[in-house]
Amino acid sequence: MGSSTYMPKSKVGKWFEERLPIMGLMHSTLGAGYNAPRNLNYWWNFGSLAGFMLVVQILTGIILVMHYTPNVDLAFRSVEHIMRDVNYGWLMRYTHSNGASMFFVVVYVHILRGMYFGSYKSPREVLWFLGLVIYLLMMATGFMGYVLPWGQMSFWGATVITNLFGAFDFYNGMGESILHLLWGGFSVDNPTLQRFFSLHYLFPFIIVGVVILHIWALHLPGSNNPLGIDAKGPGDKIPFHPYYTAKDALGLSFFIVIFALFVFYMPNIMGEPDNYIEANPMVTPSHIVPEWYYLPFYTILKAVPDKLFGVIAMFFSILIFFVLPWLDGSKVRSAKFRPATAFFFWLFLVNAIFLGYLGTKLPSEIIINMGGGIDALTLGRIASVFYFAYFIVIIPVVSRMETTKPVPTSIAQSVLDARKEG
Amino acid sequence: MLKIVKNIGLAAMIILGSVSFANASGGSSFEIKKNDWPHAGPFGKFDKPALQRGLQVYKEVCSACHSLNMVAFRELTALGYNMDELKAFAAEYEFPNGTDDEGEEVFRKGKPHDYFPAPFASEAEARDSNNGALPPDFSLLAKSREHLSMFTPWNSLYGEDYIVGILTTYHEGNPNGDEMTDGMYFNEMFLGNMIAMAPPLSDDLVEYADGTKATTQQMAHDVATFMYWAAEPKMEDRKRMGLKVIIFMTILTIMLYFVNKSVWRKVKKGDDLV
């Protein structure tokens, strides 16, 4: 951000800019003053879509809070009050609950795009870290938000997830102390609901702060691009406005159509029906499942026989993304020129989706009818081993051994080459 | 290197191809029957005569044990009643209204803003009257029993179908030949097949105001429709607004497609580089 070539046309604009150069800042971050590589494809739309979803969640959330009551006796009823009595309350709540899922969808695509095109590689490591911090904050925010309606899955999900932290029982009573701190009592109860509500309202604003850092860290090296080569010459770049504002607007508009299909026509498809039953500490649901965006990690947790090591494996499965820039030793960024890397990337993706699918199953459920039948636990263990092997073995080895395809000398040259061919 | 990768890929595809996903049926060997619901689908609307009949079944049969805590009389306008009918309906109920000068409890007639009164004062009373079982509240029951599947929609189970299933699949005794627990009834739909609710419906149990023949199947259908409305009263508003939003956003998307195309025309082909 920093220096700007922005020149206000009006006198008032000049007067203001001398006193607070905020218009210049906008110009140089999202306007014509920011030059982006000319070859960004539609996978580069998902950053702005994630930003849009953050705003949607904050706006709908603020309105929901106007009518919601964070108390174990009133929370469930107040959500139904929003659904039934508040004008357009159903729209706010369905937008917010489906918005959480859509936010995770676009963020997952955004992260996977970074993995495929090597956006985490030098000089964008800090940009990558900040993105992962946003993702971790989103996980915490989403989890606490799911507790607020105080349905059966809210309560029991909260019980299961908070209990995980009890595994850190390194000296006598430590695990219990952590749990009491999380709960604000001796079980998931009113103090838990109230602290989760408080933090659920706070975290999105921390996310906004980290998003600003994320964009700042983006603008120093500039965007990566599908070729993964540095954009150097003037022919490699085009102004963000109007090119990418137009492209982002198109992507956003299409995205809203998809989003609307969920909100208006299948608003409950991503939720658990049990959450329409008010929380009851005396009745355990037959099957406790977290929201879909945690499922792959839930399978990894269940795959490890020991509780402490299961929890460690689960946290490790996300934290390992932080060292990805160093696990990958290739000189080429984009998987476009790394066929083996690309192949394993898709295998990783299929495996991650499979892990998520297994997360919805009971460990003893037979998934594959072959031989005596293979159950979800066995498959979960195999898929978890592959998940970690991808980071610890496959990426370090493949990225260093692979013969890469020839990389174009510049973005402009690749455009000219394509022009010659067709 | 590439060849190894391709071979691994081929092997993985063969393994994945041979996977047949086992269908989890929850231990019950009974099939759920799917009904056609006029309110299902993107243009589905509530069948108002069915809602009114369903309300009648709820009032005359179910409400003896099941509460409907989150529905107010005023909301019944959605079933097609006018304000006078609504006031008359509400007036059939009595609500406590403080005490008189001698400290005796006083009652007043119900008004549109009142909520359906619960049949039991507490959970303990409800359990005591029902052989230890708690009759669930109806306000959200239809939504809490649906199981929607995004990737295999044909496996989706609507709460309404579940409710009709519960009401119409009772058996005399246990068809598996096992002994029945005292006070329990065999039901195909219920988890574990043992339900504490005695078969609530029988043919001609109610006399429908609109003259429809009150078969068990008909009453089950009507009350399930009513319960879905109770759980999702804003469904019609939602679908109506959804249609507008989607038409508007689709047109905007098409327009933005051409805007984007014209903005990028020169740059796309690299005309600016020559």
Image (spheres, rainbow, N blue to C red):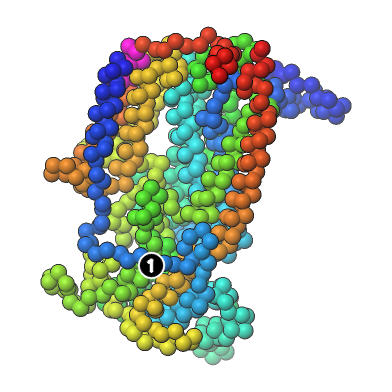
Instruction: Please give the name of the residue rendered at 31% of the width and 38% of the height, measured from the top-left corner.
Output: A355
The part of the image, by quadrant, that contains residue B186 is: bottom left
Residue with the mark numbered 1: B35
List the single residue furthest toward the front.
Answer: A422
The magenta-colored residue range is: A392-402
The image position of residue B189, as x and y in percent, is: 28, 67
Asked if residue B176 shows in the view, the reply is yes
List the single residue furthest toward the bottom.
Answer: B102
Instruction: Please give the name of the residue rendered at 50% of the width and 18% of the height, measured from the top-left corner.
Output: A227
Q: A154 or A398: which is nearer to us?
A: A398
Instruction: Please give the name of the residue rendered at 34% of the width and 85% of the height, measured from the top-left corner.
Output: B203
Q: What chain letter is assigned to the residue under label 1?
A: B
Instruction: Bin the neighbour count of mark 1 within 10 Å (Cα to Cα): few under 14, some 14-19, many 20 and up.
Output: few
The image position of residue B111, as x and y in percent, is: 58, 81
List the single residue furthest toward the right.
Answer: A11
Instruction: Please give the name of the residue rendered at 55% of the width and 49% of the height, measured from the top-left corner.
Output: A260
Q: Mainly helix, strand or loop, the magenta region?
A: helix
Label 1 sits on a secondary structure element that is loop
B257 part of magenta stretch: no
The image position of residue A376, as x and y in percent, is: 23, 43
Q: B98 or B227: which is nearer to us?
A: B227
The image position of residue A361, as x and y in percent, is: 28, 47
What amino acid type should be assigned to the residue bearing mark 1? Asn
A400 part of magenta stretch: yes
Position of the C terminus of chain A by quadrant? top right
